[in-house]
Image (cartoon, rainbow, N blue to C red):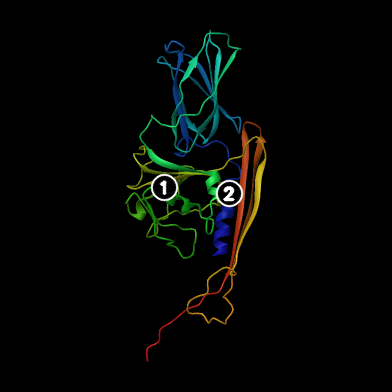
Amino acid sequence: MSNKLNVAVVSLAIFLCLHTVPLSGQQESASITGQVTDRSGAVVPGARVTIRNQASGASFVSVSDSDGFYRAPQLRPAVYTISATADGFSTVVREGIEARVNDRLRVDLALQVGTVTENVIVTGAPPLLQTEDATVGQVVDNQKIVELPLNGRSWLQLALLSPGAVSYGTYDSYNPQSQVMNLGGNRTAQTDFLIDGADNNSFVIGGGAQAHPPVDSLQEFKVQTNNYTADTGRLGGAVVNATIKSGTNSFHGSLYEFLRNRELNARNFFASPTATKPQFTRNQFGASAGGPIARNKLFFFANYEGNRNRQDSILARQVFT
């Protein structure tokens, strides 16, 4: 079991070793749109809007159309700074705009008369209500993924925090991280699992996720239960869309080990009360690292996790004479 998990984790780590921008067809991306106006409310066409990733420095430039609207599709989930400038106006800057997986945010910008070299920094919370689509879902961010207790460190257990989620335990005895669940009253096989927009479905009976990356490699994931867009819909149930971390302009990483043993385990009901508890030792250990290869352009991120289980079991049989 541990060998199979190690091979899968190493393969995933190699695949993710060079992680740049997502492909245009991937569905884990977020988008930001809005309207550029002046202080009187009149639209400002031709305004140059720059959306910059605060962690990686990557920028996307959009120009407002005749109705003053700008659009920034296919953005990687991150925190962004948005700036807009036009002839005869000061540059307006909005900081701390968090775009999460599959978010469709609207951020309107109001320009003030002045010179381009003048900056007007607008402070305030990013929009909480998404008015650009009717998708119903819940995002589980990296802090919750890493800090909440997980038996076996299976991130899919956290999907059960979503409304209408019911667990049926594990289906695959060879993969303890396999999590079978019903979302929104649908069948288990009707949940669509994605990683960075790519298909991650197990096609064995019962369904579920095929790949289970370590929790330290996940940026966040979203459980969409209703009204998701056509590019996301594949099955009749919910969509569980996860995104992998990327490198940034600063180096970051982690080193960890989790130990579970038999000392606090309950004794099997059929075991002799005087016998030693059966052996149970689980070591989960690993490391992750990410950083820049070429600042603002190319980044790397890699994660390795090993799992070692040493376990005895007690079997009880009923004999008829």
Left/right placement of residue 203 relative to residue 287 reads: left
Q: Is residue 22 above or below residue 179?
A: above
Numbered circle sitting on residue 162:
1
Q: Is residue 226 left or right of residue 102?
A: left
Q: Which quadrant, please, contains the N terminus?
A: bottom right
Q: Secondary structure at mark 1?
A: loop
Residue ID at (61%, 43%): 301
Residue 181 in the image: x percent, y percent?
Answer: 39, 55
Q: Nearer the viewer, residue 119 or 229?
A: 119
Which circle's residue, 1 or 2, is located before the other in the chain?
1
What residue type is disc 1 on? Ser
- Find residue 40 and report its image quarter: top left
Q: Position of residue 189 (x, y in %)?
A: 36, 54
Label 2, on which residue?
216
Identify the residue shown where x is 34% and y is 47%.
235
Residue 287 horizontal/vertical position (percent): 64, 51
Q: Is residue 43 above or below residue 200?
A: above
Work out which quarter of the rendered image holds the C terminus and state it. Answer: bottom left
Q: Distance between the Cα atoms at labels 1 and 2?
A: 21 Å
